[in-house]
Image (spheres, rainbow, N blue to C red):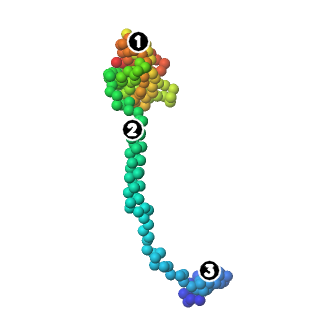
């Protein structure tokens, strides 16, 4: 047994004799086993593994780029490009009464083959939807009275864009208004 181990064991007064005997036995077993074998030098050097040879990497990169371009092109062709159509007319709306600070604009898009007038309405300044139980409605008017509904929508605190469609001939009407659910009071008017 090494003198150093004896010094360590003797320095600790609280060790019981059984614990001292166990430590000596473990120390003797470690001396008997000897040092671990040397690690071969090749294990210390990092290996450089190439995923693919240079030619195959070039082919794989080219295929990935071609696939990405094809997916982008398919998405572009299949995507909704309603924003590409030019508005036939833009109709500004201003707030009235309780909604004096509100405003909107209606972008009337070209009439489709079935006679529908798609429109995009940009609204700001109206009070937000009260938990899904409230909405606004866009109307066509004649002599200032709401005659034909063009659809319902909700808003958030910021600017809201709504897509609606008007199935009526527009010639018989003289304006547009927005009302809130359950009220005939115009909040926005052309």
Q: Secondary structure at mark 3?
A: loop
User: Which residue corresponds to mark 3?
Assistant: 14
Q: Is 38 or 75 nearer to us in this picture?
A: 75
| Image position, residue 143 (x, y; %) | 37, 10
Q: Are marks 3 and 2 in contact (CB under 8 Å)?
A: no
* Image: 109 above or below 55: above
Q: Give me the residue at 54% from left, 87% from top.
A: 4
User: Which residue corresponds to mark 2?
Assistant: 76
Q: Are marks 1 and 3 in contact (CB under 8 Å)?
A: no
**Circle 2: is it few (<14), some (14-19), or many (20+) Cα within 10 Å?**
few
Question: How far apart, in angstroms, are the residues tagged by discs 3 and 2?
Answer: 80 Å
Q: Is residue 9 visible?
A: no
Q: Is residue 82 visible?
A: yes
Direction top: furthest residue: 143
In which image quadrant can residue 86 be found? top left
Q: Is 165 or 160 nearer to us in this picture?
A: 165
Q: Give me the residue at 38% from left, 57% from top.
A: 58
Question: What count of labels does the image hold?
Answer: 3
User: Which residue corresponds to mark 1?
Assistant: 145
Q: Secondary structure at mark 2?
A: helix
Q: Is 104 or 59 nearer to us in this picture?
A: 59
């Amino acid at each position: 047994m090494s003198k150093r181990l004896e010094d360590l064991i003797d320095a600790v007064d609280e060790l019981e004799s059984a614990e001292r005997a166990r430590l000596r036995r473990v120390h003797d077993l470690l001396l008997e086993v000897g040092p671990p074998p040397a690690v071969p030098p090749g294990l210390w050097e990092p290996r450089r593994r190439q995923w693919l040879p240079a030619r195959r990497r070039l082919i794989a990169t080219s295929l990935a780029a071609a696939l990405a371009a094809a997916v982008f092109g398919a998405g572009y062709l299949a995507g909704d490009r309603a924003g590409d159509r030019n508005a036939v007319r833009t109709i500004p709306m201003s707030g009235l009464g309780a909604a004096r600070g509100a405003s909107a604009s209606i972008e009337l898009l070209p009439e489709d083959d079935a006679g529908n007038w798609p429109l995009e309405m940009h609204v700001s300044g109206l009070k937000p939807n009260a938990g899904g139980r409230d909405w606004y409605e866009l109307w066509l008017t004649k002599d200032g009275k709401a005659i034909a509904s063009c659809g319902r929508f909700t808003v958030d605190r910021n600017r809201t864009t709504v897509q609606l469609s008007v199935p009526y001939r527009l010639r018989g009407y003289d304006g547009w208004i927005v009302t809130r659910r359950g009220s005939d009071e115009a909040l926005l008017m052309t």
